Every structure is written in C-alpha cells, then in structure tokens.
Amino acid sequence: MSLHRLRPADWITGVSGLVLLVALFLPWYGADGADVSGWSAFAVVDLWLALTALGALAVLTLTAMRDSPTVPVAADVLTWTVAVVAVLLVVLRLLALPGEATEREWGSLLGALAVLGVCSGAWWAFRDESAPGIRQPDAIRAMQAPPPGTGPEPVAAET
C-alpha cells in the first residue's frame, strides 16, 4: 500500500465517502421534537447511500494498493455511477420530507455535501489520466543481429 499513488481526486472521493458513512448516523430530520437519523428516516435510500460510501472508500483503498491503474479506474467509474443515483435520491429527499418529518436537521446537509463530494471526486478521478507511483514498464531493448555465419543462411524462394 502506497499513499503516493493517491491523487487529490482519490482523497476527495474517499474522505467524502467516510463523511457520508458517518452522516448516516447523524440527525437528518426532526419529527415531533425528536431527531431521526439517516438510517431511521429512509427505507432503501440509506442502503444506497451506504453503498455509495463504501464504493468511495474502495476507490481510496484500491488506488493505494494496486500497481496498475485498471482496477482503480473501474472502481472510479462504478462509484461515480452509484453516486449519481445517490445525488438524485438525496435531492429528492431534501425537497420532499419523508413520513412524519417536519424539519431538516444538519445531518441532511452534511450528507448531501458528502454525496456531492463522492460524485465529483469519482468523476474527477476517472477523468484524470495521471498515475503517480505506478510501476513503470521495463524499457524495451533492441536485440542485436547475430554475427554473420553463426546461423543458417537464408534460402532464396523458387518462383
């Protein structure tokens, strides 16, 4: 594992994913004087947000662990795709309060910013073609021709 392989976009994606995972435990809505966390307020959206957060953490981990960029780029693309859907779900939940909720709490704003961070970081990561710390391929060396008379002589083709 080498942290030198991580680009700024990978850091944004991973940190935003960690913030999103923590934000799910914070109060997102208020209902009758009680706070409702992200886990309690949603039926399926919370699972999609957790998947988004875990994908973002996977981007950070895979990029730091892999010598080649193929797997991290695939993780970036998958995470971005999941995060786009998560952005839409969070925007819908910010516009329409779920169930008996009467007000939005600060956790919903933090969660929305974290989802936007994951989406933008993953998009930037798979668009960035730099690969710091990646193992470079061996240099190609030209082979020398054998000295004359050391091998079979070429035969002319009959026409």
Image (tube, rainbow, N blue to C red):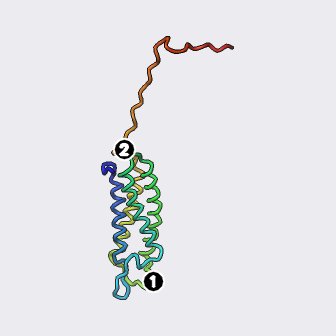
Q: Say which residue appears at 40% left-offset and 37% top-offset.
A: 137
Residue 69 relative to residue 11: left or right: right
Q: Position of residue 129 (x, y in %)?
A: 40, 46
Q: Position of residue 156 (x, y in %)?
A: 62, 13
Q: Say which residue appears at 43% left-offset and 25% top-offset.
A: 142
What residue did someone put label 1 on? 99
From this view, report whether residue 152 is shown above or below residue 5: above
Instruction: Report how far apart the C-alphas of labels 1 and 2 lie in the structure.
Output: 49 Å
Q: Which residue is at the front of the view, 11 or 92?
A: 11
Mark 2 burial class by Cα count in 10 Å: few <14, some 14-19, many 20+: some
Mark 1 burial class by Cα count in 10 Å: few <14, some 14-19, many 20+: few
Residue at the left extreme?
4
Residue type for callout 1:
Gly
* The quadrant where residue 49 appears: bottom left
* The quadrant where residue 80 appears: bottom left
Q: Say which residue appears at 39% left-offset and 56% top-offset.
A: 59
What residue did someone put label 2 on? 134
From this view, report whether residue 79 is shown above or below residue 95: above
Q: Could you say whether the residue bearing mark 2 is in a helix, strand or loop?
A: loop
From this view, report whether residue 63 is shown above or below residue 92: above
